[in-house]
Image (spheres, rainbow, N blue to C red):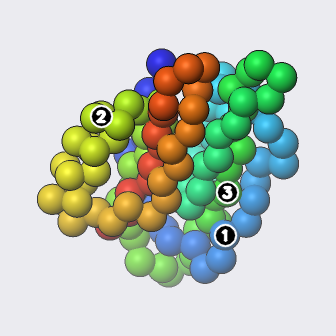
Amino acid sequence: MITALFLAVAPTGSQAQTVSNGWFSGQQYQQFYNSQIANSQLVPVDIQATVFEGQLRFNGTLAPPQVGGRRITWATHHGLSDQQFHALNQSYTAQGHSLTHHQRYAQFGYIANQGIWTR
């Protein structure tokens, strides 16, 4: 199971743009994602997972920073069981975050969830 957390503070974007232009393995997407977040302070607004030719692949949309914009906190997780997802959703909601993206998908015989929360 793949589980990851990215928690950061970044400026909001005025419009989202797709910065990944292909489907990556989990490791490739994680490297790409980390480089985009670190170098550009982008905010994740969407992440998609699919199984293609027997391999789990990821693609996502990140929003560019808005100069002078409101700063937000965000968190994203993937590879979560339903129970893990619901527990995190309750925790983030209690802290004032909103679930802005959720995908539930079948991953090699089990169900996985990923989500993005912002505040």
Sort mark 3 into few (<14), some (14-19) or many (20+) by Cα contacts within 10 Å.
some
Task: Give percent across and percent down for residue 36.
Answer: 66, 46
Rendered image: mark on residue 16: 1
Rendered image: mark on residue 96: none
At horizontal 65% and vertical 76% (from top left) the residue drawn is 15
Q: Which of marks 2 and 3 is in front?
A: 2
Q: Earlier in the sequence, mark 2 or mark 3?
A: 3
Give the quadrant of the C terminus.
bottom left
Above or below 72: residue 57: above
Distance from Cα at disc 1 to Cα at disc 3 = 7 Å
Residue 42 in view (yes/no): no
Residue identified by numbered label 2: 84
**Looking at numbered disc 1 in the image, what kind of residue is underneath it?**
Ala
**Residue furthest left as drawn:** 94
At horizontal 45% and vertical 64% (from top left) the residue drawn is 100
Mark 1 touches mark 3? (CB < 8 Å): yes
Mark 2 touches mark 1? (CB < 8 Å): no
At horizontal 66% and vertical 70% (from top left) the residue drawn is 16
Task: Give percent across and percent down for residue 88.
Answer: 27, 44
**For this rendering, which residue is in front, 16 or 10?**
16
Distance from Cα at disc 2 to Cα at disc 3 = 24 Å
Rendered image: mark on residue 61: 3
Would residue 20 be found to the left or right of residue 77 on screen? right
**Looking at numbered disc 2 in the image, what kind of residue is underneath it?**
Gln
